[in-house]
Amino acid sequence: MSPAYGYSSQCLVGLALVLSVLLQGCQSLGSRQGDAQVTVPASAEQFTHWDLDGKFGLKLDGKGQSANFTWRNRGSDYNIHFSGPLGQGAASLSRKNKQVTLNADGQQWRAANAEQLLAERLDWTIPVSEMRYWVRGIASPDSVASRIEYNPDGTVALIEQRGWLISYPRYQELEGLRLPAKIVANRDALKLTIILKRWLAAQQKTND
């Protein structure tokens, strides 16, 4: 079966796993990891190493669900852990050494990239690669954004890319770096609202 943008109740769990990466009012900010002070980059483009806790709400055809998430990002690698996504218990989506792994319901699946994994397991395509950019309030360089609007202070107010409309109604400051505090993403009948509760800058290693 060819991957397509289709949303059934059976697919919502997998959709939430990936879309939660878009997945932000902030309750706590920081830049310490252990006892070491971590320097926060001057731009969102350079901010590639972080730990964050948040919550997202997903609405589709008038039905809503929510889940908590913890996202550990190290450059192009990541581990996203979900607590009770859509009532399904714990799950995780991770990427390391160019390998993506999905763990859910006691099962594990692997693929070369998240798009391939979701296409194979859930039979539709989602632009996972763009999401690590969108969550920082910037458009992905991997495809052309059809529209970008800015706030008077220079932060991004709206991005339209890959068929998604992503708005940023609120920002927060992490040691001078302006980052999204809330994100609302829409595509067709799907609406995703993300609240970030804690965002920490992580130490970047020389081999990251």
Image: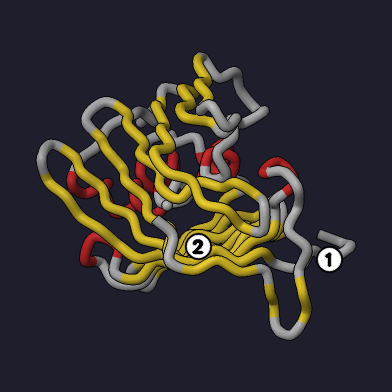
Instruction: Classify 118 as above or below 186.
Output: below
The residue positioned 70% from the left and 83% from the top of the image is 34
x and y, in percent, of residue 201 in the image: 66, 64
**If the image is split into quadrants, where does the C terminus sit?**
bottom right
Locate residue 24, reporting x and y percent: 42, 52
Q: Which residue is mark 2?
A: 80
Q: Could one spot residue 98 in this view of the protein?
A: no
- Name the residue located 67 percent from the left edge and 68 percent from the top edge: 31
Query: Local crowd at mark 2 within 10 Å, few (<14), some, or many (≥20)?
Result: many
The answer to whether 143 is drawn above or below residue 8 in the figure is above
Q: For label 1, count other residues whose C-alpha is less than 10 Å away and answer few (under 14), some (14-19) or many (20+).
A: few
Whole-percent x and y of residue 170?
42, 43
Circle 2 sits in a helix, a strand or a loop, which is it? Answer: strand
Determine which of the numbered discs, if any, sits on residue 205 in the image: 1
Q: Tell me the kind of residue under disc 2.
A: Ile
Q: CA distance from mark 2 to mark 1?
A: 20 Å
* Rendered-image quadrant of the N terminus: top left
